[in-house]
Image (cartoon, coloured by chain):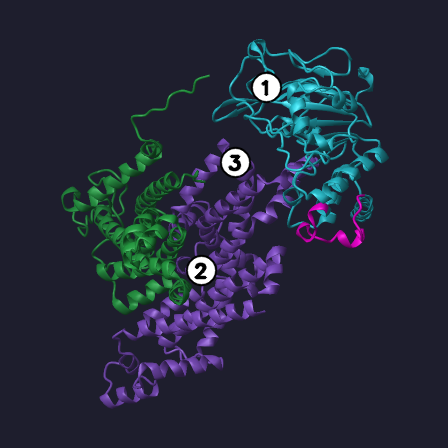
Amino acid sequence: MTSPGNRLLAVEKLCVTIPARSGMLRALDNVSLSLEPGRTLALVGESGCGKSMLCRAITGILPGRAATNGRIVFAGQDLMTLGEKELNRFRGHRIGIVLQDPMSSLNPVMKIGRQIAEHMRHHLRMSAVQAMERAALLLDSVGISHPAERLASYPHQLSGGMRQRVAIAIALACDPELLIADEPTTALDVTVQAEILNLLSRLQQERRMAMILVTHDLGVVAGRAHETAVMYAGRIVEQAPTVELFTRMRMPYARALFEAIPRIDAPPHLVLKAIGGQPPDLAVAQAGCPFAPRCTKARERCHREEPELVAAEREDHRYACWFPCEGEDLC
Amino acid sequence: MRFFLRKFLHLLIVVFAVTALTYLMVERVPADIAGEIAGQNATTEELVAIRARLGLNEPALARYVKWVSGVMKGDLGNSLATRQPVTEALRSHLPVTLELIALAQLFALLLALPIGIITAWRAGSWLDRAIGTAAFGFASLPAYAGAIALVFIFSLRLKWLPATGYTPFAEGIVANIRGFLLPALAIAMVEWVVLMRVLRSDLIATLKEDFILLARCKGLPPWRILLTHALRPSCFTFITVLGMQTASLVGGALIVELIFSLPGVGRLLVSAINSQDYPMVQGCVLLIAIGYVAINFLVDIIYGLLDPRVRKGLSHG
Amino acid sequence: MAKPASDQRIPPFIKGVLHLSFLFAAAWLISICTGAVGAGWWAGFSPDQMDTARLAAPPGMGHLLGTDAMGRDIASRLLFGARVSLIVGFCAPTIGLVAGLLLGVPAGFHGGRIERAIMTGVDVLLAFPGLVFLLVFTFAFGSSLPTLTIGLGLLTAPRFTRVARANTLRFVDREFVLAARASGAGNLSILVREILPNVLPPLLIYMLLVVGYVIIAEGGLGFLGLSIPSPTPSWGGMMAEGREVLDQSPHVSMIPTGVMFLTVLSVNLIGDRLRSRFEGRDAP
C-alpha cells in the first residue's frame, strides 16, 4: 500500500444517499480508494454502479438533496468540509473533468476558444489574449489541426472525436493535478475511441497527472491503468494493480465482466457471454452480497452476510467475496 | 434570401388586409360628415357639393383603391377635422408613442430579467414561490387599473411625479422622462410577468443541460455561469415574446396614453374616431398595423442572428 | 422500507386541485355570480339612485361600500356591473371557442392550402391591435350587450384558432386516428369522434384564461366610456369615474378595481390550476 503522505487523493468510507421517489437510494456505500500523483486508476462497472456518482462526489457536484458521509482528502484537504466557493478553486484548476458526451457537455452557442479560455482567465488571471494563445497551444497538444482557426468554431462544426479533444483541452487548461475522465469514449465511434484513449495516456504521462478513468468496458483498461477497481451497486468489489487483476481475478462479478469482453481471436458466431439479471435496486437495503442474486457461484452465506473488502494474499489486491475464484481457471 | 422574401410578402398581405378590414367596418357608420362640416342650416346643394368634394359619392371599393394608391405615393390624405395632411399628424404623434413603448419595455425587461434569472437559479425555493404568486397577481391587474394606483401613490400622495402632461424632449430631458415614468411603469407592471415566466422556464430547462454541469466543474462562479452560459441559449422564447409584446403595444398603449394625456398615436386615433375623421382613422390603423408587423419581422431576424444553428439553416432556405 | 399508502378515496386529479387558493377563487366566483344574477334582490339601492346627502362617502353609514361622486351606492352598482362583465366575460370566449373549433381543427386536420389560408387570416386578425379593433368595432356597430359580446368574441377567435390547430396537430397522427381511418371511418366522423374529444379539454381550460382577458378588455372599454352606455354601470366605467375624486376618496376607484382584480385573479387561478393538473406539469 502506498504511504499516506504520498497520496494525492484519498477517499475514505464515502457514503452518498439520494432521496428518490422510491425511497433513499444508496448511490455510494462505504467506498474507499487512494491515488498517487502520476498514476491512473480505472473504475469499471455497469451503468448505475456508482462510478459517475463517485466522480461527481470528488468534484463536489452532487444533486442538491444528497446526504453524504465520509472523507475525500485531496492534497491534504478534506473536500467534504469545504463550501462552494472554496471548492470552486479546486474545480477546473486542480481537478479537471472530461464528461461522457462532448456534444452535450460543450455549450452549443459559444465558440470553443472561449470555452477553453474562460476558466483560465478566472483561475489563472490571464488576459484575454494570453488565454487565447494558450488555448491554441492546448488545441494543438490534443491533436487538433489548425488550432488558431479552430478557436472560432462552434461545437456543431466539429466531429465527435474532435469535440472530445476540445473537452480534454478544457479539462487540462489550468494544469490540474488530477484528471477525471468519466466514460470519455462511450459516446464516440469505435475507430476514434482508441485515439482518444491514447491521447489521454500520453497527456497524462507528459504532465504527470493522476487520472481516474471511468468506463464500463474492461477491455479499455488493459495497458492504460496502473490500478483497476471494479464497482457494483455503489461498492468497490475488487481492486488491484491492473496486471494482477487481469491474471488473478477473484470476485465472480469481475470475472463475468472480463468474460463478457468480445475477443478478436474467438471463433466466429460465438455467443457473447452476458451477465444475466439486473443490477439491484439501490433503494432497497439487501442482506448479503449485492451480486449474489446474479452470481453463478453464490452459496447460502452469500445471501446472508455481506462480504468485506479485504486483501488476502497480496496487500494491494482487495476483493469482497466469500468464495472467490481460484487461480486462472473459470470460476 | 427566399425566406425573407416570403416573410415580406406575408407582411404586405397582412398590412393590406388590416386596412381593408378597417375600411369595411368604418363604412358602416351612418354618420353624415357632410352635415357636420356644413353646419346646421346647410342647403341640399351645399351638402351635395361637399360630398362630391370629399369623394363620398363614389363606391367604397373605388375610394379604397384610391386611398391605397395614395399610400404607395406616401400620401395618406387630409384629416377631415384639421384639413392638414394625415402624415403630418402621425409624424408628430408617433415619437410620443414610441418613447412610451420603449420605456415600458425597458422597465419590463429590467424587472423580468433579474427576477427570471434568480427564480430559475433558486427554483422551488420559498423565494421562487413567493415571487411566482406575486407575479400571478400582477398579471391579473389591467394596465389602466395599475395606472390609477400609480397615480394615486406617486402623484397624489407622494407628489413625486406628474399625473398627466407631456413635455417635449426639446424643452427638457428630465421633465420629458418624468412625464413618461408612471405610464411606462403602468404598462411594464403587467408585461413583465409573461417575460419573467418564459425566461425562467427556459432557464430551468437549460440549467439541467450537461454543459452547465461542465461549467460548474470548471469552477466558474454561479453568476458567471448564469450570465454567460445559461442565459443565451435560454433567451429565444424570451426575445420572441418581448418582440410580440412590443408589437402589440403599438396599439395597446392607447388607454395609458389617454389616462396620462400623452399626445401619442392612440389619442390621435380615439379623437379621430370620436370626430368621425375617416382618413385619420385609416392612417392611424395603417401605422399601427405596419408597426406591429415590422416589429415581428425584426424579431425573426434577430432570432436568426442569435442562434448560429438557425443561421446555418437559413442560408439553405 | 414501506411507502406510506396514498389516500385512495379521493381520485388524484381532484385531490391536487383542492388547494386553498383554488377554494378561495371558486368561492369568490360563486359569490360574484350569485350577486350578479340576483342583483335585483341583493342590491340595497337602484344603481342610478343618487343620495345627494352623501357624495363620495366612504364605506359605512347605510352604504356598505360607500358612494361614488354622484352619491350612487357602490355596492349595488358593482352587482349590476358584474352582470355586464360576467355575461360578456363568459359568452364572448364561448363564441371565440366555437370559432376556433370551426376554423382551427380543420386547419390542423387538412393542412395544405386550407391551413395556410386560415392561418394567414389568423395572422391578419392578430395584427389588428385588440383595443383598436374594439374601438372601431363599437364605433361601427354600437355598444349594446350583444354587439360587445360579438366584438370581443371575434377578438378572441384568432387565439382560439391557433390553440385548436396546435392541439389538433398533436392528435392527427396518433394511432387511434389511423386505426379509425383504417376501419373505414370518414373524415367527419373522425373529426367528431376521435379528434374533438381530445381537443376540447385543453381548449376549455384555455378558455378560462381568456375569460380573464375579456373581462379586462371590457373593463378597458368601460374605462373609456365605450362599453354599455349609462345608466347601466360597468366596472371599468366606475373606475374611470372615480378618477375625479381620486385624491379625496380613492375608494370610489379602488373598490371596483379590487373587485375586478379578484375576479380576474380567481378565473386565472382556476384556469392555471386545471391546466397544470391536466397537463401533469408544475405551473410556474
Q: Quadrant of the N terminus of chain B?
A: bottom right
Span of residues in magenta: A142-161
Q: Which residue is mark 2?
A: B248
Q: CA–CA distance between discs 2 and 1?
A: 68 Å
Say whether residue A203 is magenta.
no
Q: Which residue is mark 3?
A: B123
Q: In the figure, the purple chain has which letter?
A: B
Q: Which residue is mark 1?
A: A295
The reply to whether the C-beta atoms of the residues labelled 3 and 2 are less than 8 Å apart is no
Label 1 CA crowd tier, 10 Å (few <14, some 14–19, many 20+): some
Secondary element under disc 1, as helix, strand or loop, is: loop
- Compared across the picture, whether B91 is left or right of C190 comes to right
Three-letter amino acid code at the position of disc 2: Ser
Nearest-to-viewer mark from 3 and 2: 3
Badge 3 and badge 2 in a common chain: yes
Three-letter amino acid code at the position of disc 1: Cys
Task: Give the drawing colour for chain A.
Answer: cyan
Residue B250: x %, y % from top left: 46, 62
Say whether residue A147 is magenta.
yes
Q: Quadrant of the C terminus of chain B?
A: bottom right
Numbered disc total: 3
* Viewer-side residue, A129 vs A70: A70
Nearest-to-viewer mark from 1 and 3: 1
Q: Chain of mark 2?
A: B
C232 versus C123 height, above or below: above
Residue A185 visible, this angle: yes
* Viewer-side residue, C68 vs C184: C184
Instruction: Point out the tag, 3 or 2, that comes first from the N-terminus.
Output: 3
The reply to whether the C-beta atoms of the residues labelled 2 and 1 are less than 8 Å apart is no
- Compared across the picture, whether B307 is left or right of B186 comes to right
Badge 1 and badge 3 in a common chain: no
Q: Chain of mark 1?
A: A
